[in-house]
Structure formats: C-alpha cells, structure tokens
Image (tube, rainbow, N blue to C red):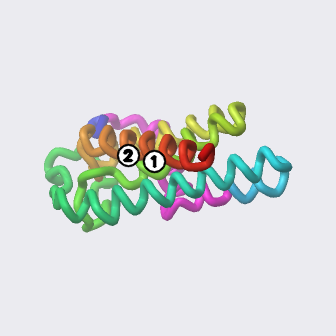
Amino acid sequence: MAAWRSPVVHRVLSAAEACAQGTKLWCSAAVVMAATGGRRGRRAAGAGVAAMALAQVVGNGVGKQVADRPRPPKEWIPHDKVEDRPPSPSFPSGHTAAATAFCCAVLPAWPAVGLLCTVPAALVAVERVHSGAHYPSDVTAGALIGLTSAWLIRRVARA
C-alpha cells in the first residue's frame, strides 16, 4: 500500500486522514447525529463517542506506551507523505482504533449511519499504512481495539 503512487489515491487518502485527525470527523458526526437524529441519533452519538474515548485510552494511552514500537523505516516509503508522520510509537494505530470504535458502536443504534461511517473509517485505516505511519499489524491491532471498545460500550449500555 505504501508504494501506491496514484495521485487520486494519494489525494483521497490524505483527505480522509486530515478529516479524521484528532477525531474531529467522528466528533462532528456525533454532533450532527445528536442534533438531527432524535433519540436514536443521541443514543448512537453517545455510544460512538464513548467507544471512541475508550479506544483512545486503550490504544494511545496504554498500547503505545507498552509496545513502544518504532514507525516503519522512512526508506520503505517511496513518497513525501512519510515526512508528516507523528513521532509517537507505531503500535497500535490510534486513528484506526477510534474510527473502528465509533463506527461499530453507532452501527447497532443507527445501522444506516454506521454503515456510512465505515467508508471514511476504512480509508483512514488504509491511509495509515500508505503514509508510512503504521505497519499493517498496527492497523489490525487498532481495529481490534476499536471493535472491543464498541462491544464493551454496547454491553455496558444494555446493563
């Protein structure tokens, strides 16, 4: 993925990452859902934000500190996007954890919106490898953290 040189692919993935930076895409989606979706929208937004917060704590607050894995070598990435990656550890992907957690928590409460959210979430996951910020295993671990966080939040909400 990191070797893809298509300008269209590069622009689409860069735009997805820019929107998701700092969880602003998911927080914005939650605000829109809560404001326009009635009770279902508020429930979906609350579950999404809670799952995303849990995934961020587990992924960035614990996972990166414990694993302390360096980013992929710059020499492996044949484009200039590699210069924009963060200095923090690579494992797991916090972007992917947040995106997956949000989507998977929203999905049961509001399936149409949850499915719609999976498109930018998948683009973010692919972009993290394409940009050289993460190994595929970092993204996989982030997705698993996100899935688990969404599952836990949905279980707690039912109880």
As drawn, the residue found furthest toward the front would be 159
- What distance separates the C-alpha of mark 2 from that of mark 1? 6 Å
Drawn side of residue 95 relative to residue 93, left or right: right
Q: Nearer the viewer, residue 10 or 102?
A: 102
Drawn side of residue 157 relative to residue 65, left or right: right
Badge 2 density bin: few <14, some 14–19, many ≥20, Cα 10 Å: many
Relative image position of residue 50 (x, y in whole percent): 56, 57
Kind of residue sitting beneath label 2: Ile
Residue 86 shows in this picture: yes
Drawn side of residue 73 relative to residue 31, left or right: left
**Residue 22 to residue 123: above or below:** below
- Image point (82%, 57%), residue name: 35
Is residue 43 found inside the magenta-colored segment of the image? no
Relative image position of residue 138 (x, y in whole percent): 27, 45
Majority secondary structure in the magenta region: helix
Of the numbered discs in the image, which one, if any, rests on residue 100?
none
Q: Are marks 2 and 1 in contact (CB under 8 Å)?
A: yes
Kind of residue sitting beneath label 1: Ser
Is residue 23 found inside the magenta-colored segment of the image? yes
- Image point (29%, 52%), residue name: 133
Residue 88, quarter of the rendered image: bottom left
Relative image position of residue 12 (x, y in whole percent): 51, 42
Question: Which residue is under mark 2?
Answer: 145
Find numbered disc 2 in the image and state the secondary structure of the residue it sits on: helix
Find numbered disc 1 in the image and state the secondary structure of the residue it sits on: helix
Question: Which residue is under mark 1?
Answer: 149
Q: How many marks do you count on the picture?
A: 2
- Image point (82%, 49%), residue name: 39
Relative image position of residue 152 (x, y in whole percent): 48, 46
Residue 10 shows in this picture: no
Range of the magenta residues? 4-28
